[in-house]
Image: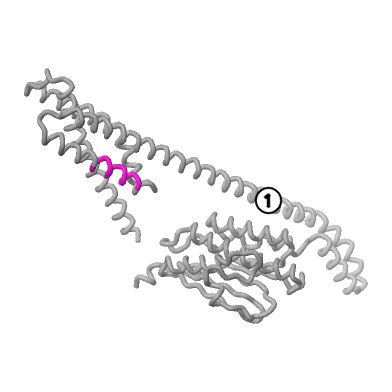
Amino acid sequence: MLLGLRCSKDKFLILGSALLLGIFDSTTIILSNLILFLFPTLGSSNLDFFTNISIIIISYLLLRKIIPNISTNLTSTNKKVFIGVLSYVYISETILNAYVLSDTKPTEVIVVSLTLLFLQSIFILIMYIALVEIQKKLLSHTQQKELLQEKQELEEYSSYLDQNEDDLRRFKHDYQNILNSLKIDAQEGDVKGVIDKLSEYSNSQFSEEALRKYKDLNHIHIKALKSIVFSKLTQMYNLGISYNFGCEPEIYKIPQNIDLLDLVRVIGITFDNAIEAETDYSSSNALSKQDLRIEAMYYQDHDDFEFMIRNRIPNSDISLNQLAHKGYTTKKQHQGLGLANVKQFAQKYDNVIIDYQAKDNWFIFNLTILPIDEVLD
């Protein structure tokens, strides 16, 4: 995979370099003929040679200054567009050069054509630069939104940790007092009284849901995978949906051929489907508030990656084949694109296995990404 990416990058660099050399050569010829046409007195062989050398030197100095930017454009995400611009300029110059070289005395029409070519080339380059700048601004805006969201998530996570730390400190502070108060009951043999007091204190000081709110998030060491789970757990907690998330063992990497954004998108879709389904079931009274439940987990064995999510359903009579088709949904006012998009993700990568089923009033979704080496073998 990496070799293929490297070869693809080299092809664009080679093609772009060849086009640039062609444009450089054509531009030199065009400028020489244009100067000689505008200044006929330079027509002697010595002056003609001097003119060509001057143009070549000036062009070389200009190219040397802009080569780093050209190299960047040939390896950026806009490389195909840039190759297209270079191809257009090269073909246009080649055609006009053919007219110039076929006539020893270029006519005014050719001069006008050359002028139009330069103006058009400049316009195309300006449009390309504008396109790149617009893309940068859009990307910057998207990145700023993502950074703002991450900042909010980190602040909430930090607040959650601070709250737990305060609870733990308070518990430690009260621990000795609690033991002292229970000594008398214990000495008198009132075991039930000791247990009741401990239970009452624990229930008043600690919320089981709060303690499990972000359980195992610290086991995820890939920022994007942690962020998507964090946002969805927060959403479920705020909606009052009972949930559980697990991550075993700690996750440091995923198979290298997988685009992380593709994977995050799929995980987000499946979480959204589960949350929306539970919300709809609750609104329609198909499930009681107590029956709403979502369970999810990350798992890794050697170099693979597994993701499982399941949510409660009123019954198991769901058409699984229809769910995977674009446009079908069991949810009201939705387009039904979720699992269809997930299916496209599986078709994009040979080492992705997706399985979903309805069983025992659960809708279960499993995603397995095998190490790319296993697929190649």
Read off the magenta span: 81-91
Q: Residue at x 72, y 58 (%)?
A: 238
**Residue 90 drawn in magenta:** yes
Closer to the camera, 68 or 194? 68
**Crowd rating for badge 1 (residues with CA inside 10 Å; few <14, some 14–19, many 20+):** some
Q: Is any atom of residue 266 visible in this view? A: yes
- Position in image of residue 109 (x %, y %): 20, 31
Q: Is any atom of residue 299 visible in this view? A: no
- Position in image of residue 137 (x %, y %): 49, 40
Q: Which secondary structure, mark 1? A: helix
The chosen color scheme is one colour
In the rendered image, which quarter contains the N terminus?
A: bottom left
**Left or right of 37: which side holds 70?**
right
Q: Is residue 267 above or below residue 36?
A: below
Closer to the camera, 51 or 61? 51
- Position in image of residue 289 (x %, y %): 76, 69
In the rendered image, which quarter contains the C terminus?
A: bottom left
Closer to the camera, 95 or 28? 95
**Left or right of 45: which side holds 17?**
right
- Residue on which disc 1 sits: 156
Q: Which quadrant of the figure has residue 2?
A: bottom left
